[in-house]
Image: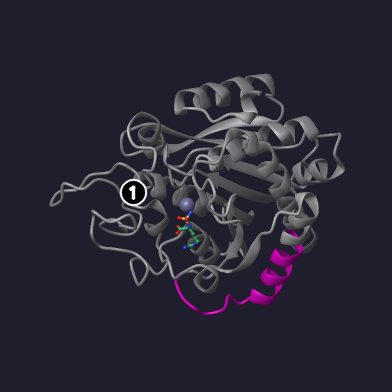
Amino acid sequence: GSFYEQYHPLEEIYFWINKISHEHPDMLEIILIGSSFEKRPLYVLKLTGRRNSPRRAMWIDCGIHSREWISPAFCIWFVQNAIDSYNKNPEITQMLDNMEIYVLPVMNADGYVYTWTTRRMWRKNRSRYEGSNCIGTDLNRNFDAGWCTKGASHNPCDHTYCGPYPESEPEVSAVAKFLREKKDSMKLYFTIHSYGQMLLFPYSYSYNQAPNHDELQHLADEATQQIRRYYRTRYISGPGATTIYLAPGGSDDWAYDLGIKYSFTIELRDTGSYGFLLPPQLIQPTCLEVLTAIKTITRHVIKNT
Ligand code: 0X9
Ligand code: ZN
């Protein structure tokens, strides 16, 4: 298979980021937004059409949880697909001409490296704090949104450790700082996870309905119908808290409360047969079907913002 049909270690992803930006300087720009706990760079790709003066922006991050390898693979595939489809596919062209698209391919760089070298099922980052020998904070419990209430843990040895305080983790604070700076133009937020085949929206830190709940539910239903039409894959949708579980400190809820009224977590394939060990042959179909959902949602956001 091609580069886009395989999983890659972090060094190869960094190399790809450099290569593709040099090949398409008119459409891609590399932005260094910060560094990880172990001082690895966090690169964001800024993707734009050639004739755009967009006042809108959207964000896609991948790899918050290191063992979810399909997630970085999606971000990489998405960037490549957008570049190839620009001026060919009308929906992608419209998307790039109306939105600046910021893509963070691997948010949890240290954890990702660790899953390649040492422990495939590692989820958290690799931070250490005094007072415990356990390593790692769950980056999706460290955002400042109902931080460390029910659904997260104060115990550093747990999978859902929320960290010593909100935004304690350099990966989280880098993303939060960048989104805060861009919040006026940022209209749409996606965070890509696996697995479970779900399209989730706020809230996850409480059972309260989001102010635009009905609009989000309707839009999510439309998006999952598109996925179903593509390969008959079933995705379910709803607010995080009622669809999976209460889980505070997540990036989607934080982005939403920052003012990004279209905020989604996508749990990619599958529903558990392979789980995190999704075979590489399934990268392409997984990405293709979810792109239909992203197109549907983006079209709606362009029309309504
Ligand atoms: O628990 C999570 O962080 C996500 N599921 S995963 O299996 N990929 O770990 C779901 C996140 C939903 N959103 C929030 N909890 N805010
Ligand atoms: Zn996850």
Residue at 47% from the left image edge and 27% from the top image edge: 9
Secondary element at image label 1: loop
Give the quarter of the figure containing the C terminus: bottom right
> Residue 28 falls in which quadrant of the image?
top right
Up/down of 218 relative to 61, above or below: below
Specify the color scheme.
one colour
Residue at 23% from the left image edge and 53% from the top image edge: 157
Residue at 75% from the left image edge and 56% from the top image edge: 228
What segment is highlighted magenta in the picture?
205-223
Specify the amino acid type for callout 1: Glu
Up/down of 184 relative to 129, above or below: below
Work out which residue is located at the far bottom of the displayed protein and give it: 208
Magenta highlight on residue 96: no
Question: How far across and down, in percent of the image, does residue 221 sit?
Answer: 72, 66
Q: Is residue 274 left or right of residue 118?
A: right
The number of discs equals: 1
Question: How far across and down, in percent of the image, does residue 304 sit?
Answer: 77, 64
Work out which residue is located at the far left of the displayed protein and give it: 131
Magenta highlight on residue 221: yes
Q: Which residue is mark 1?
A: 169
Q: Is mark 1 within 8 Å of ligand 1?
A: no
Mark 1 burial class by Cα count in 10 Å: few <14, some 14-19, many 20+: many
